[in-house]
Amino acid sequence: MAQEKNKISFEKAFEELEQINEWFQQEDINLDEGLKKFKRGMELVKLCRERLKEIDNKFHDIKKEFSE
């Protein structure tokens, strides 16, 4: 996952999540494929959360730097 973090941007991860969501909106879905897509979606959600947390921490650091 650490290598993947460097390979995919937040925007690309979010875009892929949207595609997975659209796939699940189909009427007929393959259960095995759905399970794979669900797992991938959870990996992407984790990646996005980690990236958002990093950005939030940087935001607070910058804010703190300029308020002193």
Image (tube, helix red, strand yellow):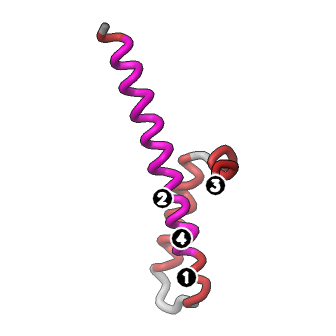
Q: CA distance from mark 2 to mark 3?
A: 12 Å
Q: Secondary structure at mark 3?
A: loop
Counting residues from the start of the chain, the first of labels 4 and 3 encountered is 3
Q: Secondary structure at mark 2?
A: helix
Q: CA distance from mark 3 to mark 1?
A: 21 Å
Q: Quadrant of the N terminus?
A: bottom right
Q: Position of residue 62 (x, y in %)?
A: 40, 19
Q: Position of residue 3 (x, y in %)?
A: 69, 49
Tell me the residue that label 3 is attached to. Answer: 1
Would residue 67 be found to the left or right of residue 27 on screen?
left
What amino acid does circle 2 point to? Val
Task: Identify the residue at the far top of this view.
Answer: 68
What amino acid does circle 1 point to? Gly
Tell me the residue that label 1 is attached to. Answer: 34
Whether pointer 2 and pointer 3 mark residues with C-beta atoms closer than 8 Å, the reply is: no
Q: Residue 66's quadrant in the figure?
A: top left
Q: CA distance from mark 2 to mark 4?
A: 12 Å
Counting residues from the start of the chain, the first of labels 1 and 4 encountered is 4
